[in-house]
Structures are given as C-alpha cells and as structure tokens.
Amino acid sequence: PSADAPRRVTVLGSTGSIGCNTIDLIDRNRDAYDVVALTANGNVDVLAEQALRLRPEVAVVADEDKYAALKERLAGSGIEAAAGCAAVTEAAARDADWVMSAIVGAAGLEPTLAAIRRGCVVGLANKETLVCAGALVMAEVEKYGATLLPVDSEHSAIFQVFDFEQAQRVSRIVLTASGGPFREWEREAMEAVTPAQAVAHPNWSMGAKISVDSATMMNKGLELIEAAHLFPVPEDRIEILVHPQSVIHSMVEYVDASMLAQLGTPDMRTPIAFALAWPARMAAPSPRLDLAAVAQLTFQAPDTERFPALRLARAALQSGGAVPTLLNAANEVAVARFLAGEIGFLDIARSVETVLERVGSMPLATLEDVAAADAEARRLAATVTPRARAAAE
Ligand code: NAD
Ligand code: MG
C-alpha cells in the first residue's frame, strides 16, 4: 500500500490477549487502518464491541451456537455476522493486505494458510501453526509470495537483528526464556501446582494456554521449533537461555563473535507494532525500558530435568516428520486437561511423552497427514494415563 492509503487489516483471534493488544494499536491509529474482518471463538460481547468500534466488513464466531447472539448485537450496523470454522477461514481469505494470526493452537492453521495463500503480510503470533505444519506452511509462504512476520517477542527480536543476506554467517541464535513461575521450584513441589498458580506468569500477561506452556517451559520448546522454521539456522545452533527479567528478548551471534540483541519491557504491543507497521515503525504505548531501574540482568542454563518439555521439544525437532505435530496436539489436550483439573501439572509433559511413545512414526507430506497426526495424538492424549502415574499404580 502507498504511504497514505490505509492498510487493510484482519485480526484472527481478536478477542484474545494478542488480539486485544492488536485492536488497541489499530484503534490508536484509526486513519492508518481499515479493518476487513475480526474473528473469535465465542466471546460475542468483546467481538461485537470491537466490531461496532472498528467497523469491519465481517465479524465471525467459530462457535456456531453463538451466531444468533452475534447477529443480534450487530443488527442494523451493516456489519456482516458469520459463524463456524469455515466462515473463519473464509474471513481470513478476504482481501486484506495484512492479517494478524492470533488464534490459539492448531485451530489457527487453516485460517492462517488462507491468508498466506492470498499472498498477505501475516503477523504470526500463533506459533502452534509452525510447530504442527512448519515445512508445509513455509512452502506455501514461498509459493504464494506471502510475508511472515513473527509476533512472538523472541522471534520478533531475532527477526529485527537477523541479517538474512548473511544467514550463513550467523553462528548461533540465543532464544531467551523467563523460566516461568516455577523457575526455582524443586520438581517434587511442582507435582501439586494448581491451574491458578500456573497461569500467573511473573512477567507477561497472556492467554491461559500459553501461560501454562510457559510454566512447563513447553512454550520455549514450541518456540525452538518455531525458530527453526523461521530462520535458516540448523537446530543445533539454536540455544535456549534462561533470563528471568525478560529484558533481552533474544540474540543472534555472527561468525565474528558479535552478538546482536533486541531489548524492551515485556509488553506485546512492541512486537505487534513492529509487525503492524513493517517495514516502517509506529509509536507504541509500551512502557520504556529503564535499565538503571532494572539494574541487573541475570542468566542461567535451562534445566531439562525439571522441565522435560524442553527435552521433548528438542527431540521432536530433531526427529522431524510428524513428531512435532504429535507433540503439539498432545500438549494442547494435556494443557486443557490440566486446566480442567483432570491431570496434574507434571502430567502434562508425561502425557506428551506417552503419546509420542505410543504413536511412533507417521508420515507427514501433506496437510491431510498433518490432520491425521493431529487427530491421532488428540485421541490418545484425551484418555492417556501419564507415564509415571501408570508406573506408580
Ligand atoms: P487467548 O486465549 O487470549 O486468545 C485466543 C484467541 O483465539 C481468542 O480470540 C479466541 O476467541 C480465539 N480462538 C480460540 N480457539 C479458537 C478456535 N478453535 N477457532 C477460532 N478461534 C479461536 O490467546 P493469546 O494469549 O492471545 O495467544 C494467541 C496465540 O499467540 C497463541 O498461539 C500464543 O502462543 C501466541 N502468543 C501469545 C503471546 C501473549 O503474550 N499472549 C505471546 C506470544 C505468542
Ligand atoms: Mg514468546
């Protein structure tokens, strides 16, 4: 788009944590953006309020039971209401220039692909899309000339300091991790962690699923796989480093031993603004970094004994094929079961490991293969008795 023409934008998952932050930035710069579509799972109140304020062409709920409520809230506004997963994907395929992919989980894959296939600039928050179908998604990005801009703060940091023209001179990526709320806990104590404890992240305010992933450190495992797809660097050159202050969002080291980092306060509006304005920059309301007040930055090596999800994700990336797809799907189900009180905190990684052991290898060449692997892992994960539990019984 020309410098003055409003950018036509769509927000998938507009009612979530990333979605609301994206809407906040769009709302502060109304002249710069025309909203094409907003989608949510079922939060009609927030979706209708956003739609009436930002006037998209269409607002969509994935949950068909919410259609009547949405239609009623939008009556007389001229904004189309739609419902169902197919309608979410159809909305993602409308003629926007820029699409925020902020649905949580593998549910975001199809709508994200629809935007990619229109050759859009896609702001990618939905890391599960790359974990469950990374190679296929990246091939579609290439085929349709789409642009993928990472919104995950670590990947936005890497993107901002990664010299793609000298990719072969990158010697290492250092992915920083806060370590989550249980960074210093003994493993035995984690057995009794409650959902309320797990969703209370020390630095970031996020949706429930990613908060639990941060607590198990599966989030960093998913981010490792995400980074391996986004940046042309071999897996063994992507390191994880625990950095509790979340000030350095990640780093790239070059062959001359120079390390470049991106820093900031932990506020997702900065990486979202980076993607929203790219290739320009826009003002963001994030608090400024006061390093004198922070005073100290500390670092420690990750502990894969206490946080086995890190080991499982690294192994899944090394195995390739359907293993990352299975890992992601099993983790989604295990997190949901933990939040529902069905399994304990440490059972999340145990369930994932058990599912991976049971399924073995599956082919992964097409999107149908992704769907089959995803479904098989979900089927097993829904009833699996986690490993250590089974041994104890
Ligand atoms: P969230 O739970 O707050 O929001 C999820 C959004 O997706 C909501 O709008 C919800 O209505 C919608 N949604 C959920 N299930 C759906 C389905 N089946 N079909 C259609 N829509 C559905 O989650 P979030 O924290 O905003 O995270 C969104 C994504 O961004 C995740 O992939 C997460 O890993 C990633 N991410 C989030 C943060 C963060 O700070 N919150 C940071 C980095 C990456
Ligand atoms: Mg992140």
Image (tube, rainbow, N blue to C red):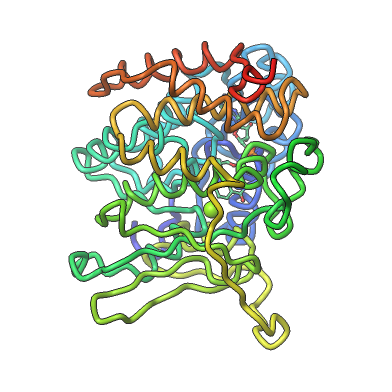
Horizontal side of residue 59 vs 121, given as left or right = right
**For residue 363, which quarter of the picture?**
top left
- Camera-side residue: 135 or 101? 135
User: At 47% from the left edge and 43% from the top edge, which residue is drawn?
Assistant: 311
**Vertically, is 145 above or below 177?**
above
**Vertically, is 161 above or below 257?**
above
Horizontal side of residue 237 vs 157, given as left or right = left
Spot occupied by residue 32 in the image (x, y as percentages of width and height): 50, 59
**Vertically, is 264 above or below 379?**
below
Q: How many labels does the image show?
A: 0
- Camera-side residue: 144 or 96? 144
User: At 40% from the left edge and 69% from the top edge, which residue is drawn?
Assistant: 280
Q: Which residue lies furthest to the front in this view?
A: 392
- Camera-side residue: 274 or 337? 337
User: At 37% from the left edge and 63% from the top edge, which residue is drawn?
Assistant: 159
**Vertically, is 68 above or below 165?**
above
Spot occupied by residue 389 in the image (x, y as percentages of width and height): 67, 21
Horizontal side of residue 113 vs 381, given as left or right = left
Q: Residue furthest bottom?
A: 292
Pick the quarter of the image with the N terminus. bottom left
Pick the quarter of the image with the C terminus. top right
**For residue 83, which quarter of the picture?**
top right
Spot occupied by residue 89 in the image (x, y as percentages of width and height): 44, 25
Spot occupied by residue 213 in the image (x, y as percentages of width and height): 61, 41
Horizontal side of residue 257 vs 93, given as left or right = left
**For residue 62, which quarter of the picture?**
top right
User: At 71% from the left edge and 57% from the top edge, which residue is drawn?
Assistant: 184
